Image (cartoon, grey):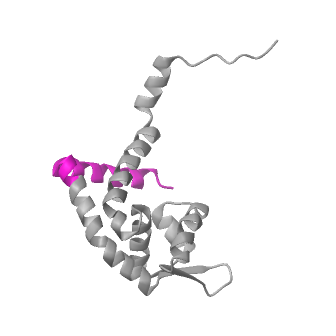
Amino acid sequence: MKNEVEPIDEATLNRVGASCTCFSLRKAARVVTQLFDEQMAPSGLLVTQFSILGVIATMKESTMNQLAQYLVMDRTTLTRNLKPLEREGLIQINPGKDKRTRLISLTPQGVEALQKALPLWEQAQSSMISQMGKERWESLMSHLSDTTHLLSH
């Protein structure tokens, strides 16, 4: 006799979709990413790339572990995200004091790319705040910060 899997009823699927924290956050993140990517397109950078470059600029020089920890990103994903930035000459990755450590920093082209993208990012940010309303945006930012802090290990 075959093991038949009972189909999940539509009401259950709708309930899970409507109440799943991860699904809702990822869906909202995709919408926000699309807004920023559209407005930042003339810079040639995606908002995810802009964010990574901005963090690297702030840290001046960081190890892969430090950058991954700050971005709350696993090293494999971070490495995959850094490759195009390195290929485009926006960052450099050099050996650290020991062979296991890699140091990441911006190149002059990376600084230039950030400077070019910054006004477009500011427009996207203003658009986001305008569409949401300042009070709702501030509340969202506060809740996102709390969520990251409370759930990070």
Q: Nearer the viewer, residue 27 or 100?
A: 27
Identity of the residue furthest to the right in this view? 1
Residue at 46 percent across and 41 percent down: it is 22
How far across and how far down the image is residue 56, in percent? 44, 75
Is 142 covered by the magenta stretch?
yes
Picture residue at 41% right of the left edge, 67% below the top: 45
Q: Could you tell me which quadrant the N terminus lies in?
A: top right
Q: Residue at x 38, y 72 (%)?
A: 54
Picture quadrant of residue 37: bottom left
For the image, the number of numbered tags is 0
Q: Is residue 53 above or below residue 40?
A: below
Magenta: main secondary structure: helix
Q: Residue 38: name its quadrant.
A: bottom left
- In the image, 112 versus 19, the foreground residue is 112
The residue at 21%/54% (across/down) is: 129
In the picture as drawn, the residue positioned furthest to the front comes out as 42
Does residue 143 show up magenta in the picture?
Answer: yes
Please tell me in which quadrant of the rendered image residue 82 appears. bottom right
| Residues rendered magenta in the picture | 129-153
In the picture as drawn, the residue positioned furthest to the top comes out as: 1
Above/below status of 12 relative to 88: above
- Left or right? Give the position of 35 relative to 134: right
Say whether residue 99 is left or right of residue 86: right
Image height of 21 relative to 52, above or below:
above
> Looking at the picture, how far across and down is residue 83, in whole percent?
57, 71
Residue 127 picture location, percent across and down: 22, 55
In terms of depth relative to the viewer, which is nearer, 128 or 59? 128
Q: Where residue 44 appears, x then y in whole percent?
A: 40, 69
Above or below, comparing residue 54 to residue 16 in the picture: below
In the drawing, does residue 23 fall left or right of residue 137?
A: right
